[in-house]
Image (spheres, rainbow, N blue to C red):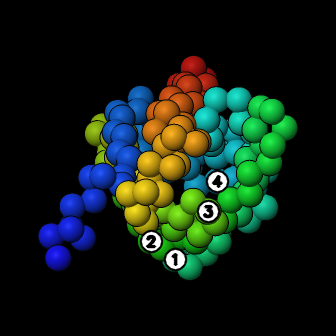
Amino acid sequence: MQKERTNTSDREIRISRLLNAPIELVWEVWTKPEHIKNWWGPNGFTNSITKMELKAGGEWNLVMHGPDGTDYKNKSVFREIIKHKKIVYEHVSSPKFIATIEFESRGNSTFINWHMLFETREQFIQVVKTFKADEGLKQNIEKLEFYLRQFNSK
């Protein structure tokens, strides 16, 4: 039975990317509401962040405004924050998942490893089918890359 719990590949989404920005900048645009609201979410979405307490046990509340006018309330709780290394948060509103984002400095670039683990395989399938979470995460990291470019051109 224990083996089932250790293999989570059927209920997770992973994406990695080498970002053309130093880790200090990547960390800042990830952890400051005035930045993250500009790139968070899939294409066409905007965000209102009402709370972002970047500490273990801190809340992160935001509303994602869909291109069709639908509002999606999101509530998360930060589980672990290690500056310039790792952010772990639990998305406590539905759909429930745990996201782990790891940051690694590579000179003037930053390697980011983003992992989302859903509670069950069924929930994972539902989220991917209904909300296209896999494509959404890909768009999210592309929006982050695009957002970072404005700082490189200065």
Q: Quadrant of the N terminus?
A: bottom left
Circle 3 residue: 94
Q: Quadrant of the C terminus?
A: top right
Amino acid tagged 3: Ser
First reached walking from the N terminus: tag 4 or tag 2: 4
Q: CA distance from mark 1 to mark 2?
A: 5 Å
Mark 2 packing: few (<14 Cα in 10 Å), some, or many (20+)?
A: some
First reached walking from the N terminus: tag 3 or tag 2: 2
Mark 4 and mark 1 in contact? Answer it, CB < 8 Å: no
Mark 4 and mark 2 in contact? Answer it, CB < 8 Å: no
Mark 4 packing: few (<14 Cα in 10 Å), some, or many (20+)?
A: few
Please, is residue 58 above or below residue 107 in the view? below
Which numbered mark, 4 or 1, is in the foreground of this view? 1
Image quadrant where residue 42 sits: top right
Q: CA distance from mark 4 to mark 1?
A: 16 Å
The percent coordinates of residue 82 (x first, y second) are: 41, 66
Mark 1 and mark 3 in contact? Answer it, CB < 8 Å: no
Mark 3 secondary-structure assignment: loop
Please, is residue 45 above or below residue 57 in the view? above
Amino acid tagged 4: Lys
Mark 4 secondary-structure assignment: loop
Which numbered mark, 4 or 2, is in the foreground of this view? 2
| Residue that protrudes farthest toward the right in the picture | 69
Q: CA distance from mark 4 to mark 2?
A: 16 Å
Which numbered mark, 4 or 3, is in the foreground of this view? 3
Circle 2 residue: 80
Amino acid tagged 1: Ala
37 or 73, nearer to the observer = 73
Mark 1 and mark 2 in contact? Answer it, CB < 8 Å: yes
